[in-house]
Amino acid sequence: MKKSELENDAIKLLDSLNDDYVIPSSWAVIRPILKFMSVVYVMHLLALVLECVVYPDVVTTGAFLFILAIMFVSCIVLTGFAFLILYSNVNILLCINKDVLGRSLIAGIARRMIKRYFFAMIIFNIISAVVIVFVDKEFIVGYGASWFFSYLIAGISFSTSFNRYMTPAVTATFSKIGEFLSSTKGDKSVA
């Protein structure tokens, strides 16, 4: 892939904002984030079920309610973390024309990388759940920390590996997209 191809692609993304676009509703932005997080919720529940299968006495004690409460808080914290990271990016993506976004080289690269990192996070957290459960009962309360650290590691890894595509011109164009969409001015022209 050539630098000029990436830079032209970024310009096409920016130019697509000159057309009239729909400002996404809050629910339109929240829905994909919750879809992403639903995997985390299901895996928390599966880890809890595994805990109950391996240690059946946990269900009959007050420890079950404690574990359930900690896992619920963990899911809330992780959801808040996901919103902080993803909300503005999802908002920007929803403003860009879907046809332009679908043909975009940069968006395609990012999509493939995100799928790979998310798959790696799932595998890592499946292994973490199994290890945590078999270490000792009630250790499953630390499962949320496993997700939190895998978010951090995947985010840093994604940023590091995606940076090679971020030439100065591409970065400048993305900054213009962000400024354009967050601008409070009535002017809709893109320079």
Image: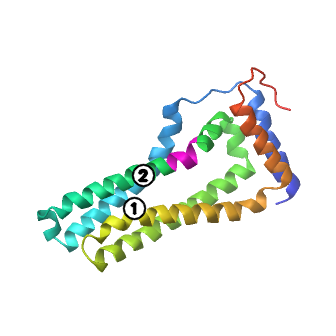
Q: Residue at x 45, y 62 (%)?
A: 147
Secondary-structure class at tag 2: helix
SS assignment for the magenta stretch, majority: helix
Looking at the picture, how far across and down is residue 82, in whole percent? 50, 50
Q: Residue at x 68, y 36 (%)?
A: 96
Categorize mark 2 by other alpha carbons within 10 Å: few (<14), some (14-19), many (20+): some
Question: Which one is nearer the viewer's eye here, 45 or 145?
Answer: 145
Looking at the picture, how far across and down is residue 165, in whole percent? 77, 58
Q: Is residue 76 magenta?
A: no
Q: Is residue 85 magenta?
A: yes
The image quadrant that residue 141 belongs to is: bottom left
Q: Which mark is residue 144?
A: 1
What kind of residue is marked 1?
Gly
Magenta span covers which residues?
82-87
Question: How far apart, in angstroms, are the residues tagged by discs 1 and 2?
Answer: 9 Å
Categorize mark 1 by other alpha carbons within 10 Å: few (<14), some (14-19), many (20+): many
Q: Which mark is residue 176?
A: none
- Badge 1 or badge 2: first in the primary sequence: 2
What kind of residue is marked 2?
Val
The image quadrant that residue 144 belongs to is: bottom left
Residue 9 visible here: no
Looking at the picture, how far across and down is residue 102, in whole percent? 67, 44
Residue 173 visible here: yes
Q: Which mark is residue 77?
A: 2
Q: Residue at x 52, y 61 (%)?
A: 151
The image quadrant that residue 163 belongs to is: bottom right
What is the total number of numbered labels drawn onto the structure image? 2
Q: Quadrant of the N terminus?
A: bottom right
Q: Residue furthest bottom?
A: 135
Report the side of 28 relative to 7 (left or right).
Answer: left
Marks 1,2: beta carbons within 8 A: yes
Secondary-structure class at tag 1: helix
